[in-house]
Image (cartoon, helix red, strand yellow):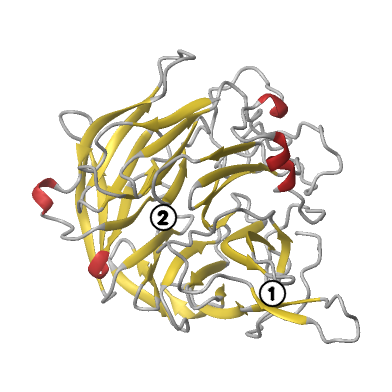
Amino acid sequence: MRGGTLQINWHDQQPVLSLDFHPASRRLATAGADHDVKIWVIASDGSDDKLPTATFKSALVPNNTAHSSAVNVLRFSPSGEYLASGADGGGIILWKLHSADDGEAWKIHKTLLFHHKDVLDLQWSHDSAFLVSASVDNTCIIWEASKGTVHQKLEGHLHYVQGVVWDPLGQYIASLSSDRTCKIYANKPQGKSKNAERMNFVCQHTLVKVEYQNHDESKPPIKSHLFHDETLPSFFRRLAWSPDGSFLVLPAGLSKHSSEVINTAYIMSRRDLSRPAIQLPGASKAIVAVRFCPVLFKPRGSNPDGLFKLPYRVVFAVATLNSLYVYDTESVPPILVHAGLHYAAITDIAWSSDAKYLAVSSRDGYCTIIEFENEELGEPHILPGTGELAEGNVACENKKPVIVDSMEVDVDDNKVQEATIPMAVEVTPPPVPTKNIASSKPAKRRITPIAIN
């Protein structure tokens, strides 16, 4: 593993607010406070002493004729045909990929104008047919991409919605707000639309507070908020589902067992989305973003007593305001920790489709690119009897296995161990649920380990 902060002019030395890899190539799109969206080609010459390189490919906003304000988020559609970008003021642009003399060109397909305040996060549905956006106007909107029309408006948050994510199995949408709540919406189809049930999302759970057992058993349990309030020094709370849909990770967590306040992230089981199943170890700064590696890996069997019991390994990255942690569901501590990456707050994370690169953006105007060696993360998981990669996987350029313990960690061992004492829990891969049990009550139980399914 090697990498570092690339000292190039990404966005006219202004904050880089979001980035995303194309799902079928090593094209990296970045968005910034300069109102621009840019496409880069990430590559490496294989040298051990050189960082990966980012070569400028094109700018999607020539002469600032598209977005007229800071671009806060961008996401490629799973099909790779579209790129969505959301900006201050509420504007969203859908870009469509076209062939050109130099190989490719992104042109404006639709302009979505319904939010009346800044758009902070976006997420595509798995089939690339719909898009959900989160805004400072306290709402989320589901858009029909082909028409550029509003399909449904999700209301209920009392403050900025700073993160939104679409379940890869299509059943749930989750949103995270600076009103200190996370809302889980379940699809409850109503009526018919073109001989099919019309998609309709209804709030099923609202996570607000949790109860902890009081050290003095004669006193009632202690109630505490699950999330940071609006004073969190970030506009982003980018949550994420695992590629197989088995669990959801929520950033901006706050744990207060006594007088000590701990920054954390919560892992939610698909089986029970009414309360957290696991509380990730405490971090020195607030957690602002989570992103899953799109590749599922074969188990190594190196830690039978790990947090998860899955037929494959899931890898995900967690970013605090100033650090990056990479977790593996087969191990207890993080497999990679990078601290002090940037001079200003981290804003977003992205994985390349082949798991070769992990990119991080920051408000200091720079991005960090981490390159993993061949099969450093493992071998891709193959579905039994099919010879095909599991859902969410793409082929990797990996050839030789590397033991996780050999990966670099740029903090001392004591700090890593101290920061990684999670609650034990067994996790099993879920079948696709066919029925939901509606409930709008916030979780009020103590956080205890449960089986994720």
Residue occupying image coordinates x 25% and y 48%: 14
Q: Residue furthest top?
A: 47
Give percent across and percent down for residue 382: 67, 34
Quadrant of residue 85 within the rendered picture: bottom left
* N-term mark: 2 or 1: 2
The image quarter in which residue 312 lies: top right
| Residue at 28% across, 65% down | 147
Few, some or many residues within 10 Å of mark 1 (<14, 14–19, 20+): many
Circle 2: element type: loop
The amino acid beneath tag 2 is Ser
Q: Is residue 247 rendered to the left or right of residue 157?
A: right
Give the amino acid type for the residue marked by disc 1 in the picture.
Answer: Ser
Q: Using the image as rendered, state which of residue 322 and residue 227 is in the foreground.
A: 322
- Residue pictured at 33% horizontal, 62% vertical: 145
Q: Position of residue 287 (x, y in %)?
A: 54, 57
**How far across and how far down the image is residue 177, in percent?**
48, 73
Residue name at image x 35 percent, y 68 percent: 143
Please say if 6 is above or below 439: above
What's the CA distance linking mark 2 and mark 1?
Answer: 28 Å
Regarding mark 1 in the picture, which secondary structure is present there? loop
Picture coordinates of residue 418, whole percent (x, y): 73, 46
Residue 313 seen in this snapshot: no
Q: Is residue 413 left or right of residue 67?
A: right
Query: Label 2: few (<14), some or many (≥20) within 10 Å?
Result: some
The residue labelled by disc 1 is: 274
Q: Which residue is mark 2?
A: 128
Q: Is residue 161 above or below residue 202?
A: above
Q: Residue furthest front?
A: 259
As drawn, 89 above or below 293: below
